[in-house]
Image (spheres, rainbow, N blue to C red):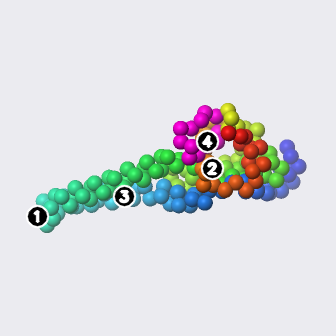
Amino acid sequence: MSRRRMLKIPTKWYTLYHFRGIMLTAAFKRLKLYPAGLTAVTVPTCLALAYADICSVTTAQIFGSVGFTTTLTLLAFSYFTNNLVGYVYTDDEGKQVKISYVDPGGKRQNRIYPVDNIVPRSELQRTLLKFYFPIKNHDNGEVYRIVHRYGEVYDEKTFTKVFGRE
């Protein structure tokens, strides 16, 4: 056990990577169920109003189409941005890495791993989309995604040490 843990000194974390669009991504991921709920309420209401000859059935079809399309689009976006990394930190000793990512519900989650448990990029399969590269650890095989084109790497040397080269 390290001296730091024995003395219960808090770990200092230094930012290695930051993706500026992570807050917007999280907001869209949280919105995905609202159009579905709104569609579930408006379509039967429009059908009831059409039955009472207050509006046409076409109105219900339009509400249903727009709601379904919006819900499907947000669900697809949520799927493709699953476990998207917003921040990567390293401790002052360079032995641990903290990965902050957005879960499927749009909430920030933090995971801390020893640097030795991170699978180097050279050992991972190449992705078809060059939009991101995966981060994986040896322990549980959970895959995180880093958007390398639009993210900002603050310390290239340490970043390469932790994740390896492509």
Examine the rendering and report whether any part of residue 58 can be seen: yes
Q: Which residue is mark 4?
A: 134
The three-letter amino acid code for the residue at tag 3 is Pro
Q: Secondary structure at mark 4?
A: strand
- The tag earlier along the polypeptide, 4 or 1, is 1
Label 4, label 3: how far apart the Cα atoms are? 30 Å
Whether the magenta-drawn stretch holds residue 127 is answered as yes
Mark 1 is surrounded, within 10 Å at the Cα level, by few (under 14), some (14 to 19) or many (20 or more) other residues, namely: few
Apparent side of residue 101 relative to residue 156 in the rendered image (left or right): left
Q: Secondary structure at mark 1?
A: loop
Q: How many marks?
A: 4
Q: Which residue is mark 2?
A: 148
Label 3, label 1: how far apart the Cα atoms are? 26 Å
The segment highlighted magenta reads 124-136
Picture residue at 12% right of the left edge, 59% below the top: 51
Q: Which residue is mark 3?
A: 35
The three-letter amino acid code for the residue at tag 2 is His
Q: Secondary structure at mark 2?
A: loop
Circles 2, 4 touching at the beta carbon (< 8 Å) = no
Q: Which residue is mark 1?
A: 53
Examine the rendering and report whether any part of residue 44 can be seen: no
The three-letter amino acid code for the residue at tag 1 is Asp
The three-letter amino acid code for the residue at tag 4 is Pro
Q: Nearer the viewer, mark 2 or mark 4?
A: 2
Whether the magenta-drawn stretch holds residue 75 is answered as no
